Image: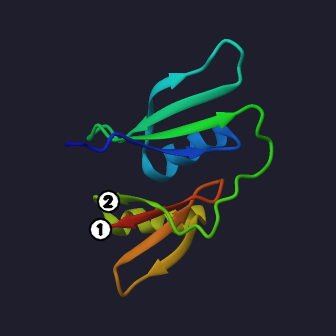
Amino acid sequence: MFSLNHFNFNVSDLDRSLSFYKEALGLEPVRRKEPDNGSFIIVFLGDGKTDFRLELTWLRDHPQKYDLGECEFHLALKAEDYEAAYAKHKEMGCICFENPSMGIYFISDPDGYWIEIIP
């Protein structure tokens, strides 16, 4: 049997991404890996409630923008207070798609990854 552990997003600016995930979703760093040669930095973010982690990976030798294809994949987070989350994300200007008939919306992180917000 398997259990979910983590999901990875490669990011172009780690500090910008860490700020976004803290402000938009309240995710905090729980673990960091960085080799002596500085070739990469991995930061695992947690929600403080579950063991699931979002892994953010910065690669020194990847200066170009990441190709996200058609953005048909996404991470989903459940909001305890959906209306407050929506208002915050609207104010941040990061809502990229809304589906009122399904009662969900998506935000986009600084690298263009989509995150679904569900009530």
Measuring from the top left, give residue 28's x and y in whole percent.
Answer: 44, 36
Horizontal side of residue 79 vs 32, given as left or right: left
Measuring from the top left, give residue 68's x and y in whole percent.
Answer: 64, 60
The residue drawn where x is 62% and y is 70% is 70
Q: Which mark is residue 109?
A: none
The residue at which mark 1 appears reads as 119
The residue at which mark 2 appears reads as 78
Query: Quick one: SS at disc 1?
Result: loop
Q: Earlier in the sequence, mark 1 or mark 2?
A: 2
> Label 2 near label 1: C-beta < 8 Å?
yes
- Residue at far front of view: 1
Measuring from the top left, give residue 13's x and y in whole percent.
Answer: 70, 41
Measuring from the top left, give residue 118's x and y in whole percent.
Answer: 34, 67
For this rendering, which residue is in front, 65 or 103? 65
Work out which quarter of the rendered image holds the N terminus and state it. top left
Query: Quick one: SS at disc 2?
Result: strand
Residue type, label 2? Lys
- The CA span between labels 1 and 2 is 6 Å
